[in-house]
Amino acid sequence: MEVYGKILIIAMPCFLALIIIEKLYGYFKGVDHAPLMDSVSSISSGVTNATKDVLGLSITILTYEWMVSKMALFTIQESALAYIVAFIAIDFQGYWTHRWAHQINIFWNKHAIHHSSEEFNLSCALRQSVSQFFNLFTFLLLPAALLGVPAKVIAITLPIQFFVQFWYHTRYINKMGFLEKIIVTPSHHRVHHAINPEYMDKNHSQVFIIWDKLFGTFQEELSEVPAVFGITRPAETWNPFKINFQHLWVLIRDAWRAEKFSDKLRIWFMPTGWRPEGFDEKYPIHKIDNVYNFQKFGTNNSKTLIGWSIAQLLLTLLLISYFFDNIAIIGIPGIFIYGLFVFVTVYSYSELMDKNKYAFVYEGIRYAFAIAIVYLTGSWFKIDDLIPYGTIIVMSYLTLCLLISIYFVTVEFKETQNQPALS
């Protein structure tokens, strides 16, 4: 928990710097593939996912430590060889986990958010799930367990393998020659994120593209078929929490409405998108039929709203940095209260990004939550011990947020409804 928080303190500014560089590159090239609101939503999703992971809000059904202790045929000491074996084993697990997330209804819920952006850029890599509470696929690490790879090696290699997947979420790198045959490249992953019929459910590999070629899911990017990004049932919101649970809510409603008991059960395990017979007509859901002709979500925003959304994100990253860097000082149960506050924060400002007329209510709830924390504990998570007047600074910021939220809902949204699009 604490160690992972420290790792994220280093990783976050690196990711943010690369996202900014990509944005500037697109701006100067005159081809911008990273609209600001989309990027704010993506990074906000990464904030919620990182917070969940740091707090350990997931349950592993089968632990790797148990597999090693019961099944290891050999013993490998911590070494370069152990890390190589671990990396390959994790990549193998990642391929199948990723593939099943695309192919099975219930598992798509945890992965849909990663594909929900209608753009493709580095910030999209941070669109990760906050709804994955159960780790079901540890058994796929069986090859590493049989070889006796230490659990410590797996624990260290997992975040490295995850971070390595960041770089290929971009449209600015073309095909990369012989590397296309070995590793996942931006070209391969553009295919994976595309909703073109030619590209759907292809290229599930995470680092080594060999898995797709071996198991029959590889598709090369075609020059005559430009990739179109998103999901066929568009999210139509910037709120990562809503995106995280949209598909699950569809499954729950369809299971409830299904007349056949067999449909109530099998809907969860059928191919992604399957619904009981006649439901598409009886209970229609907005779906993109022509991938080359649809209106992208959230393109009509004032400069003021875009600017404030960016400010909210950056200030939230500061709050997150304090949290991750002081987990031991904050302690339990403080870290879980802080984590809940982060979730409320992201929910609140992403509702404002959606121009929800009740956004100020969510901001008011966040403000009341913060007042309760300070009143009951005497400070903002002991921040005054490190930063003079830290609690006053935090509460002043939150007061400003509430006032600005009220302004947007009562004035700005009514004045900018018909203004032209800005990116």
Image: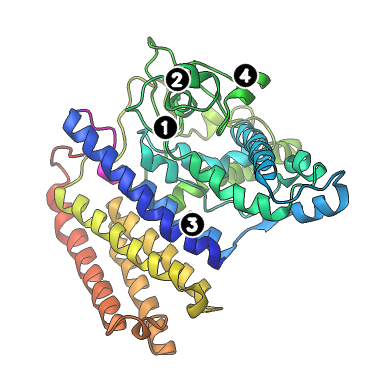
- Mark closest to the chain's N terminus, 1 or 3: 3
First-in-chain label (1 vs 2): 2
Please state the horizontal and vertical placement of residue 227, each as a whole percent of the image: 39, 21
> Separation of disc 3 and disc 4 at Cα?
32 Å
Q: Quadrant of the C terminus?
A: top left
What colour-coding does the image apply? rainbow
At label 3, counting other C-alpha atoms closer than 10 Å, the crowd grade (few under 14, some 14-19, many 20 or more) is many
Which residue is drawn at the image coordinates 37% and 50% (left, top)? 14
Amino acid type, mark 2: Asn
Mark 4 Cα within 10 Å, few/some/many (few <14, many 20+)? some
* Closer to us: 321 or 97: 321
Which mark identifies residue 213?
4
Q: In front of the other: label 3 or label 4?
A: 4
Judge by depth and name the residue closer to the eye, 155 or 288.
Answer: 155
Residue pictured at 79% horizontal, 47% vertical: 148
C-alpha separation, residue under disc 1 versus residue under disc 3: 23 Å
Q: Secondary structure at mark 3?
A: helix
Mark 1, residue position = 230
Quadrant assignment for the N terminus: bottom right
Left or right: residue 261 versus residue 49 is right
Q: Which mark is residue 196?
A: 2
